[in-house]
Amino acid sequence: MSAQHRAVLNRLSGTPRPVFLDTTAGYETNVDAIVTKAVEYYEHHLQLPLRVARYRHRTRTSAADLAAAVSEIREANLIFAGPGSPSYAIRQWRDSPVWAAVLERFEAGADVMFASAASITIGRYALPVYEIYKAGEDPYWNDGLDLLGRMGLSLAVIPHYDDNSGGENYDSRFCYMGAQRFDALQEALPPDVSILGIDAYTAICFDPYKQEASVSGQGGVTLIGDGAEQRFTAGSLLSFEAFRSSSREVVHTANNERVFGYEFSDSDEPSEADPIEDLSGFIEGLEALPEADKVELLARVESARRQGDSRPPEHEGELVDLVLALREELRGAKRFELADHARQALEEMGFEIGDSPSGAKWTRR
């Protein structure tokens, strides 16, 4: 990414005064090594000194260190931040003197170059990457710091959009979200928010004075808004109007193809009916059945399925009697097809069902 850094530095008026803001990685035990690597990168590749604004935690930073960080930012004409946790950075920056200094310099004309996790923070909504990807939270959005909103842009930024580090066995696209979670995230956004996906080794530069954005690097950017997906490669120039959105319609990224080691059939041929699945589906749809009883019944159906014709598990008779009682209610309601499914499910699990004037009887085969 030396070319992108160099292009930004060449645009600066006066002597370049780049500052690295280390908050995004402030929680890492090796944050000092990360800072050293950034400083060395500038020295070796760009032949420039890189100052550091050290602000790693809002309550554990001393007044003197906070003042030093603010001072570094106020003297910078390029503010750079990078990898780490966007959620962590937002918690430290929001309503802090450091972020106030960043906004002050931005309004005064300084360039803000945020990469990876840092780029997520500046949208109206921010992706909590680690909370979803590592901790297993259901897909959701955090409120971002919305620096882009100061240019009239309502965006959610997704870096690493084309990531393939998961190889054939794990879908790591869309900043490690994968297709299914990314589609759910799309649906959760307000209609006036567009998604900006940025590929690896790619940059997009917003010019608030010209009201346009330029794409550079090895990949491209993807813009999702108004139910449409647009792709822009390096060299593209976009008006700010291209980023506007007024409706929310999911652009589905999950499809019926062989993806990441799993094969999904696109055949129109119906699959063979599974009576046990039909029975389970029927039980799930019984609104009058208390939730605890429904869960218990479904668990016993699954247990019986797994047991097959092996030794009956404890309380198996209660399960069969309950299913037969449900079958009788279905017959009384003239739901004969579902009643037959209930009987067939029990027979598939190894039970012989016989009807008599006094009711259904069952035995193990």
Image (spheres, rainbow, N blue to C red):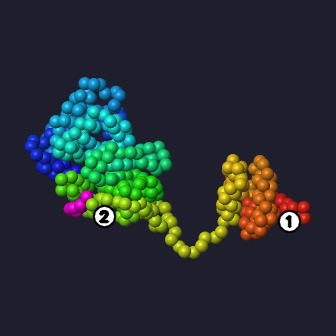
The kind of residue on which mark 2 rests is: Arg
Camera-side mark, 1 or 2 = 2
Q: Residue at x 73, y 69 (%)?
A: 337
The residue at the far left in this view is 14
Is residue 157 left or right of 109 when viewed as pictured? right
Within 10 angstroms of label 2, few (less than 14), some, or many (20 or more) residues? Answer: few
Q: Which residue position is annotated with label 2?
A: 231
Residue sitting farthest toward the bottom? 269
Give residue 6's position: percent from left, percent from top.
16, 49
Where does the image place residue 150, in percent across and percent down from the top left?
27, 48
The stretch drawn in magenta includes residue 228: no
Three-letter amino acid code of the residue under disc 1: Asp
Q: Earlier in the sequence, mark 1 or mark 2?
A: 2
Give the residue displayed 12% in from the left and 49% down from the top: 10
> Which contiguous range is marked in magenta?
235-240
Task: Find disc 1 in the rendering and name its residue.
Answer: 355
Q: Residue 362: which quarter of the image?
A: bottom right
SS type, badge 1 = strand
